[in-house]
Amino acid sequence: MNEPGLLSDPSENGPEKEAFGEKSSESTEDHSEGIESTAGSTGGVNAGKSKGKGQKKPFKSFGFMKKIKKKKGVSEGTESQTGNTSVGKPAGHKAKPNLAERYKHFCYRFGIYFDRKPNTDLAKSLYQADIEITPGMFISLAIITSLFVAVFMFVISTVLFYGMPNAFVYVFSLTFLTLGLSLGGFPFALYNKVSNKNMNIQHEIPFALSYMSVLASGGSSPLDVIRRVAAEDYGEISRELSKVMYRIDALGEDGNTAMSYLIQNTSSEHLRAVCIDISNAMQAGGGLQAYLELKSKELMEMRRQAQKAFVDSLSIYGEGYLSGIVMSVVLVVLMIVICSALGIDLKIMTPRQLFNFFVYFALPFINLMFILMLWMKYSRSVV
């Protein structure tokens, strides 16, 4: 017998070899030891097994090991491609979607009709906010979530106001109010995310331009400068420039085309102006270092002026709060106490009721309105 036959798959001429091994098991006792040693060197069978079955076991065990290794290789390759490295899962296993993904898929059954004629403005806003869903899914999420919340509020308000007079008015008022707030909450959240992104870009762009000017002074090309900044941690600026590198490296676009796409779709006017000038420098060549240094100094000076204006305006609001709100409430409370001591009739309500109204309702409400005004004033500030 030739030894290369031991290394073949048992699926090829398996019955003939097995029959031959059974018939000649007694006449090949001397050859079986050599076969077992050869199979032992290739990982087939260990020496020391029975000589009568020395030819059958190398064929079966080696073929079985080949199948195991083949399956294992397919499983490992599939796991490496899908990012799933868990042990014990078969090849081609897909991770089950979580509850949020299932809810999105459920909503998109209705949102697919909105994507037949997609809203380009909404799609651009979703791209600017880095929300990776279609306009139809966003609209369907807003509608279905608002309906679920409204139904939940209807049930809760029905239980709370059951048996009370005018319960119908309270229940439907709360239900429609909840429905309107939920529907308005989705566009507000989208707008707020885009605004926060612009604020982060405006905050980080002076430092990013300083770093870019240092790279340009070292002889780096504009694309290398963009690549380095995209790899660093400059917040939303790095994320926006990484989109440019993705279109260059993955989609095969040239630098000017990728920069033009970012210029058309970015939400920050400051970043758009910088990208336009960098794109012009890429086309014309030269002058990038001087421009970056000048622009960085300009934006840094604007940041200092914004910080100074912020401190000045905040001090004015603080003085107005102390003199206009706190002192007014204190004077009103003193007037109520004096009227109560002198027995003066206020006719609106008793001095005790008026005191409780100003202390427990008027003063907290005024403070809340003042905090809300400050939030609306300075929530978009770059300081």
Image: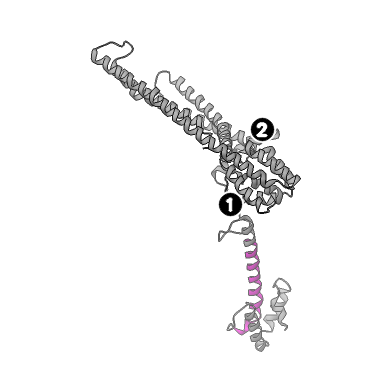
Residue 199: % across, % down = 56, 37
Q: Which residues are magenta?
A: 50-75
Q: Nearer the viewer, residue 3 or 56?
A: 3
Q: Which residue is mark 1?
A: 95
> Seen from this angle, which residue lies furthest bottom?
30
Structural crowding at the residue carrying mark 2, measured as other residues with C-alpha within 10 Å and reported as few (<14), some (14–19) or many (≥20):
few
Structural crowding at the residue carrying mark 1, measured as other residues with C-alpha within 10 Å and reported as few (<14), some (14–19) or many (≥20):
few
Q: Is residue 253 above or below residue 27?
A: above
Residue 264: % across, % down = 69, 37
**Distance from the alpha carbon under mark 1 to that under mark 2:** 34 Å
Q: Which of the two labelled residues, at mark 1 and mark 2, occupies the earlier sequence position?
A: 1
Which residue is painted at 65% across and 62% down in the image?
A: 74
Residue 93: which quarter of the image? bottom right
Q: Which mark is residue 121?
A: 2
Q: Nearer the viewer, residue 109 or 31?
A: 109
Which residue is painted at 51% across and 24% down in the image?
A: 176
Q: Nearer the viewer, residue 227 or 286?
A: 286
User: Is label 1 in contact with label 2 (beta carbons under 8 Å)?
Assistant: no
Magenta-span inclusion, residue 89: no
Residue 270: % across, % down = 63, 37
Instruction: Determine the main secondary structure of the stretch shown in magenta.
Output: helix
Which amino acid, by three-letter code, is at mark 2?
Answer: Asp
Task: Look at the image and name its color scheme.
Answer: one colour
Q: Nearer the viewer, residue 374 or 29?
A: 374
Magenta-span inclusion, residue 55: yes
Left/right placement of residue 150 relative to residue 74 reads left
Which amino acid, by three-letter code, is at mark 1?
Answer: Ala
Per the image, label 2 sits on a secondary structure element best described as: helix
Q: Is residue 111 above or below residue 69?
A: above
Left/right placement of residue 181 relative to residue 214 reads left
Residue 70: which quarter of the image? bottom right
